[in-house]
Image (cartoon, helix red, strand yellow):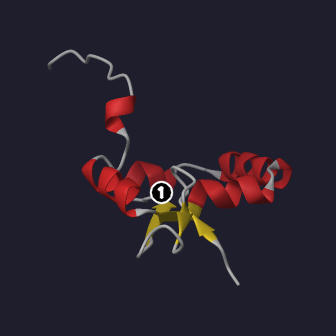
Amino acid sequence: MVHYSCDMCGKPLLLDEEVRYVIKIEAYAAYDPIEISEDDLAEDHMDEIEELCESLEEADAKDMEDRIYKTFKFDLCAACHEEFLRDPLSAKFKKRLPFDQN
């Protein structure tokens, strides 16, 4: 038998709670189309490509994969689910840095 507990507060789920909530988060690298100019096409990029290939050979495959795509799944009790919906990024716990108005 599978036993669930809340990933935020640790409370046992389905024993003390009538329902459990599942939160799925998907994080991935977003790539926007770039504009390529005539100068870009005329430039020789072989050195740049070679450096990129070398850096990929030395990189950890799991780390590279996580930088591009990662999913998370959390089980929450009703109270933690409500808290998550109120503040999904936990913004109230983060110190906000003041930015100059441009």
Residue 5 as seen in the image, left or right of residue 59? left
Residue 76: x and y in percent read 46, 62
Q: Is residue 52 visible?
A: yes
Residue 77: x and y in percent read 44, 62
Residue lying at 37% horizontally and 63% vertically, measured from the top left: 78
Residue lying at 51% horizontally and 51% vertically, measured from the top left: 8
Looking at the rendering, which quadrant does residue 69 occupy?
Answer: bottom right
Residue 30: x and y in percent read 43, 59
**Where is mark 1, residue-wise?**
41
Q: Residues within 10 Å of mark 1 (few under 14, many from 20)?
A: few
Q: Is residue 99 above or below residue 46?
A: above
Q: Nearer the viewer, residue 72 or 10?
A: 10
Q: Nearer the viewer, residue 76 or 49?
A: 76
Q: Residue furthest left?
A: 102
Residue type at mark 1 is: Leu
Q: Is residue 36 visible?
A: no
